[in-house]
Structure formats: structure tokens, C-alpha cells
Amino acid sequence: MYVGRRRPSAKGVAVGTIEERWQVLADKDEIRELTARYCFAVAEGDAGAIVELFCEDGSFQMRDRRYQGVEGLRQMYTGAAAGTTPKPFIQNHVIEVDGDAATGRCGVEIRMVNKGEAYTVAGHYADTYRRVDGRWRFASRDFMTYHWVPLSKGWA
């Protein structure tokens, strides 16, 4: 019997009991809400709320910098990101659930102001998620950029 592991799929259609399939859908919905809460907290500059969305040993990586654990994440969102006003917009979220662990990728477009200049940023997040005490959290969030340029110059 299937217990806590994702069952194989046939041509993109999940197999398993209706309860197992429902649980995967519920998990995916909770993870999508996790990423939405992240975007709102980033847009509001609420570092405390952002850190709460990560596991205690969670990490965020951007370019060549990795921020690990509660203090590292707090430093990222109060230090490195301070003075900017990023407004992230998520799309094309793909999630694979495997019991209490999951992976996901989603595209992101960010509008921000840094030192008085407007920027456009695009890329994607490659995430791992973990269910901790019944709640989905980020175990890791890696940000890969496609472009990060002043809006006045454009990305092409």
C-alpha cells in the first residue's frame, strides 16, 4: 500500500486512491500559498514574516551568496535587501510532492527601486519544501536570474 511516497503517474495522470490524490492537491495548494505569502512579505519588507516561512535550517541562494539558518536569512532580508523595494510576481509554478518533502520551480518577475533607480528582474526560483509540524516551509530557495537591469535600459 502507498504510504507517504508519491505514486508513479501514467502519462501525467496521478494514480492512487482518491484520498491520496486529494492530499497531493491539498499539499500543492498549501505550497502555492507559501510562495504567495513570501511575495507579499517581501513586497512589504517584513523580514520577520519571511524568515518564518523557512525551516530553521533553511537557506536562500542568490548569485554567489548563500544565506543559511534563521540568522543568515534575517541578515539577507534586513541587510542585503535593505534599501530596495522588490515587488515579486510568481507564475508557472510546478510542484512535485513526495510525502513530507516537495520540490518546485516557479518563474518570477520583480519590479524594484534601488538607490532611486527602477529595475526589472526576471528569473526563477528552484525550491525544496519540507512539512514541519503540519506546515509547509521552504527548506531551500535558490534564485536564478535571467536579467537584472535598469528599467530605462531594458533587458534586450
Image (spheres, grey):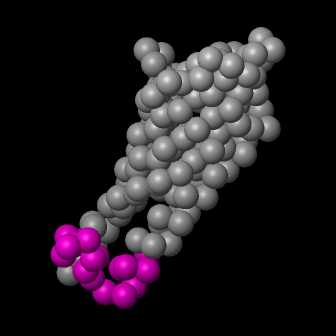
Numbered marks: total: 0
What residue is shown at x 54% (from left), y 41% (from top)? 108
Q: Nearer the viewer, residue 156 or 5?
A: 156
103 versus 15 height, above or below: above
User: Residue 69's x, y, as percent?
Assistant: 53, 28
Q: Is residue 9 left or right of residue 54?
A: left
**Residue furthest bottom as drawn:** 18
What residue is shown at x 72% (from left), y 45% (from top)? 40
63 versus 144 height, above or below: above
User: Residue 8's x, y, as percent?
Assistant: 20, 70
User: Residue 149's x, y, as percent?
Assistant: 59, 19
The answer to whether any part of residue 35 appears in the image is yes
The answer to whether any part of residue 84 appears in the image is no
105 versus 33 height, above or below: above
Q: Which residues are magenta?
A: 7-23
Q: Is residue 6 left or right of residue 82?
A: left
**Residue furthest top as drawn:** 115
Q: Is residue 8 magenta?
A: yes
User: Residue 57's x, y, as percent?
Assistant: 49, 34
Q: Tell me where residue 102 sits by quadrant.
A: bottom left
What residue is shown at x 58% (from left), y 38% (from top)? 109
Q: Is residue 58 magenta?
A: no
Q: Where does the N terminus fall, quadrant-wise?
A: bottom left
What residue is shown at x 39% (from left), y 85% (from top)? 19
Q: Nearer the viewer, residue 153 or 149?
A: 153
Q: Is residue 46 left or right of residue 92?
A: right
45 versus 54 height, above or below: above
